Image: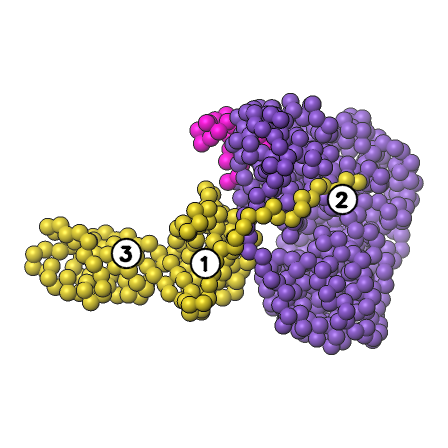
Chain colours: A purple, B yellow
Amino acid sequence: MKLTGAEILCETLTRLGVQHIFGYPGGAILPVYDALGKSKLHHILVRHEQGATHMADGYARASGGVGVAMATSGPGATNMVTGIATAMLDSSPLVCITGQVSSKLLGSDAFQEVDITGITMPITKYNVVVSRAEDIARTVREAFIIANSGRPGPVLVDITKDAQQASAEFDWDACGPQLPPKRVRNNHDQVEFDRAVELLNAAKRPVILAGRGVMLSRAMRTFEQFVRTSNIPVAMTLLGIGCFPATDPMNLGMMGMHGEAWVNTAIQEADLLIAVGMRFDDRVTGDLRTYARSARKIHIEVDRAEINKNVVVDAAIVGDAGETLALLLPHMQTRDHSAWLAHIKELKGDSAVRDIQSLPDSGHLYAAHVINDLWKVTNGGAIVVTDVGQHQMWEAQYYHHNEPHTLVTSGGLGTMGFALPAAIGTKFARPDREVWAVVGDGGFQMTMSELATIVQEKLNIKIAIINNGYLGMVRQWQEFFYDKRYVATPLIAPDFVALANAFGIRGERVTSRKEVVPTIKAARSSDQAVLIDFRVEQEDSVYPMVPAGAPLHEMIRRPNNPLVETASEP
Amino acid sequence: MQTIVAYVENKPGVLNRVASLTRRLAINIDSLTVGPTENEEIARMTICAHTDEKGAQRLEASLEKLVDVLLAENISGRSMLERDLALIKVAADQQNRPHLMELIKVFRGRVVDVAPESLIVEVSGTVDKIDGLLEVLRPFGVLEMARTGRIAMTRGNDLLRPPEARSGGKAETAPASS
């Protein structure tokens, strides 16, 4: 069967099971769009290519599959860069398809020509230029395998316009992937494995550190078995949230810079850390010299390059999280850790008193209250997509996720503007689920043009803007470390309710605590998108906080006499 | 100094990926040589890097993550041969030429070109040997020099072969639908 390169691309994507493509057309990708129109693929027209990549990323994170984004050459492709880097840092499987000028023009600085494979080399798992129609199917099939195998990541396929236009023979069986013949390493090092077993069975104060790798390996059940059998409490990274039920007594909560005090203290006092599918990011460890000094460390990780990168470990098992835990399980002795668990519980008691939820109602609206109420009203059953900043940390602290893939958030790159487009991708991946975008007033203004995409696609997404009139997390750093010199952090915002209305979306405003629950309930009863502008305390901070580079146990705690500032009236 | 041998796909852009990776890891390359192997689809690289053992481990593991790198192995500390080849153009006149020739002979170099006022020496061997020759030639006036950088090979039964057979990799994974 002879098809054009553009038709081959659409046919290949269809056969790979792709249903949704998030993209934006332009000159160098027009042949593909023409073919898209004749295919059954659902193309979602975004308002900015960064949005397309975040949508594909959200789609991938919520579905566990591969997200697909598309753009034209030049500025279309460069607009994808932030979204690609976001996916790279969080190991999210993405296939980005960009148009490129015709092969005879390559290198001539033609209109809208940019070396996008050169630009994205360090932020993709792999990228490639395709300049012949007959190479398209094979390359795209390879891209999907690379994106979603081992440690997942983004792959960019740059297709020249002449390759899209030319005709070639299309035979699915003859265009199979031809990946380079890589060495298959035998990663199972029996010495390391035995040492890990020995350490596990001898530990008195062990803590499991769980990351996103547990979910990427779809190892939730094996992981839970491991926790039950070993009787070891679990601390999670931001991206690990959801891999183990938050309400389970063995779950301590999130660790790191804004982890709860008892979690960080437990890690610092532990005699054994078992890291599973996490990479000892600096936001998790704080100062490395003082990090968990009395603990031996076991690292279970699929990416060999992560072993001993930040933290030198006593036993490293390179491999898939689920497979490795399953291998360890038969060797595990169930130990009584009741003294250790009781000690952690004691640490917790002290923190609970300081918790903002326990403070008397001062009439002020705190972001933490909004998020905690959202959790209660939704019975913890929503998929929450956050932006980056204070609200993101409050979400991690106060929305308790019991299921995997229900928190979608940019961790490694910390990309503001992620939430709204990622929520759109999430909704396409999980149309059956309630999706909330929780976003700050700063991040929302970065990508709010995607409200139009929500309307165009008639999506039922609820948007909670945690509006404090500041770039809150930066303001918090200025408060703590720059003597309250609030440079470039006070932020003017448009009237978000009127803005939503202008897009054809219902908007609500909440300024007091008593309005929170009824407004959330009313929004939930609508089958359309609703935006709620929560006017919260302007100068509240996220506690506890481990200053960047400080020892993990040296946390700034919530002061006893919190805020007097009130939220500005609308 | 750490020595890493890598087998890579012999196609455009691979050297760029390897160089880009070392830059990102802030590892300074002392020399990097690439050449074809007996299989024309596969090239062999010898990378000599200014880093410690930990850095070399990281580089090795990160290199192997690149799709086009088939195998990367840190062979520092193993029993191996290292060779560097140099062409050195030295100023030489009628008077000092015999003396020069003597010195070159001691270092097992070969004179491959003679001109009225200069000659070209070809010398191969370890870096130390070439540096040694260079040291004694310098007083005569080294006009130009080209060096290949090191190539390395482990001795005897310690074989480092590229993996064989192309495969389709894992079964293709379609995106999970809801």
Q: Are marks 3 and 2 on the same chain?
A: no
Dot 3: within a 10 Å radius of its alpha carbon, few (fewer than 14), some, or many (20 or more) residues? Answer: many
Tell me the chain of label 3: B
Alpha-carbon span between mark 3 and mark 2: 57 Å
Dot 3 or dot 1, earlier in sequence: 1
The spot of residue A365 in percent (x, y) is 84, 46
Q: Which residues are magenta?
A: A98-118
Q: Magenta stretch: residue A111 in it?
A: yes
Kindly indicate the quadrant of the structure image that contains residue A552.
Answer: bottom right
- Is B2 on the left or on the right of A543, as rendered? left
Secondary structure under tag 3 reads strand
Q: Residue at x 89, y 33 (%)?
A: A526
Q: Amino acid at mark 3?
A: Ala
Q: Can you identify the residue that label 2 sits on?
A: A62
Residue B86, numbered label: 3
Q: Are marks 3 and 1 on the same chain?
A: yes
**Looking at the image, is A17 positioned above or below residue B131?**
above
> Looking at the image, can residue B135 be seen?
no
The spot of residue A480 in percent (x, y) is 67, 56
Secondary structure under tag 2 reads helix
Q: Can you identify the residue that label 1 sits on?
A: B5
Asked whether the beta carbons under mark 1 and mark 2 sit within 8 Å of each other, the answer is no
Tell me the chain of label 1: B
Q: Residue at x 86, y 63 (%)?
A: A249
Q: Nearer the viewer, residue B124 or A458?
A: B124
Q: Magenta stretch: residue A29 in it?
A: no
